[in-house]
């Protein structure tokens, strides 16, 4: 099923040209969310990348992580915790754990936070995201989670190999699989 899923992911993906003054293409992943076979297969496929590591909880950054994280958590039979971006919405009225995210592919520095009460000291946390371009979000969440961090499961990993190894990123596709 994984090879079929990879083929479906490639076929449902598009690069789009936003037009002037842009000089780059933008990834369009909307076809992934529209295809029910992809949605059905993503949770188990991403879970299988880390199943043997026995995660006890999945953490995912907003926005698309809030879609993917629960699919993976369900496939693993564990819970899900949201990682919020600071300033993206009103403040959450309970204690949070925050970490700075190094500059991402746009050069933006952010903060990600999770509700303190939802993580136990002995949790084994799997981070799930759709795309790892620089590893910035995975690195920030690894800092936040400390020894609880197992690694990051992503649909696409286009990080340099040393970053992929350092952050234990495992993916279904590489950036080269989606070259324009």
Image: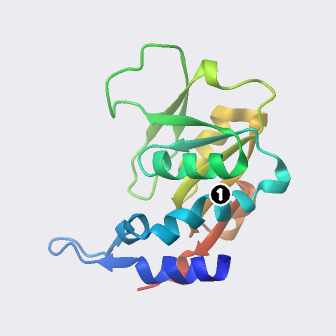
**Which residue is tagged 1?**
153
The correct choice, above or below, for 53 with respect to 56 in the image is below
Residue at image point 52% right, 36% down: 83
The correct choice, above or below, for 2 with respect to 145 in the image is below
The correct choice, above or below, for 121 with respect to 151 in the image is above
Q: Residue furthest right?
A: 52
From the viewer's perspective, tell me whether residue 157 is left or right of residue 32. right
| Position in image of residue 58 (x %, y %) | 64, 42
Residue at image point 65% right, 82% down: 3
The quadrant of the picture occupied by the N terminus is: bottom right
Q: Residue furthest left?
A: 20
Q: Secondary structure at mark 1?
A: strand
| Position in image of residue 148 (x %, y %) | 76, 36
The quadrant of the picture occupied by the C terminus is: bottom left
Comparing 155 with 180, the one in front is 155
- Tell me where residue 11 sits by quadrant: bottom left
Comparing 41 with 67, the one in front is 41
Residue at image point 43% right, 42% down: 109
Query: Coloured how?
Result: rainbow
Residue at image point 63% right, 47% down: 74
From the viewer's perspective, tell me whether residue 77 is left or right of residue 105. right
| Position in image of residue 75 (x %, y %) | 67, 52
Density class for disc 1 (Cα within 10 Å; few <14, some 14-19, many ≥20) is many
- Tell me where residue 173 sits by quadrant: bottom right
């Amino acid at each position: 099923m994984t090879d079929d899923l990879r083929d479906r992911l490639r076929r449902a993906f598009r690069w789009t040209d936003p037009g002037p003054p842009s000089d780059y293409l933008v990834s369009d992943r909307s076809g992934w969310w529209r295809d029910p076979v992809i949605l059905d297969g993503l949770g188990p496929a991403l879970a299988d990348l880390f199943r043997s590591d026995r995660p006890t909880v999945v953490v995912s950054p907003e926005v698309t992580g809030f879609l993917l994280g629960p699919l993976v958590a369900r496939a693993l039979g564990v819970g899900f915790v949201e990682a919020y971006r600071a300033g993206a919405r009103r403040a959450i009225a309970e204690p949070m754990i925050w970490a700075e995210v190094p500059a991402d592919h746009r050069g933006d520095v952010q903060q990600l936070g999770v509700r303190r009460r939802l993580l136990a000291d002995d949790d084994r946390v799997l981070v799930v995201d759709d795309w790892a371009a620089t590893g910035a979000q995975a690195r920030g969440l690894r800092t936040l989670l400390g020894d609880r961090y197992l690694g990051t499961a992503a649909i696409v990993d286009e990080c340099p190999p040393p970053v992929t190894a350092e952050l234990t990123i495992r993916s279904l596709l590489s950036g080269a699989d989606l070259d324009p």
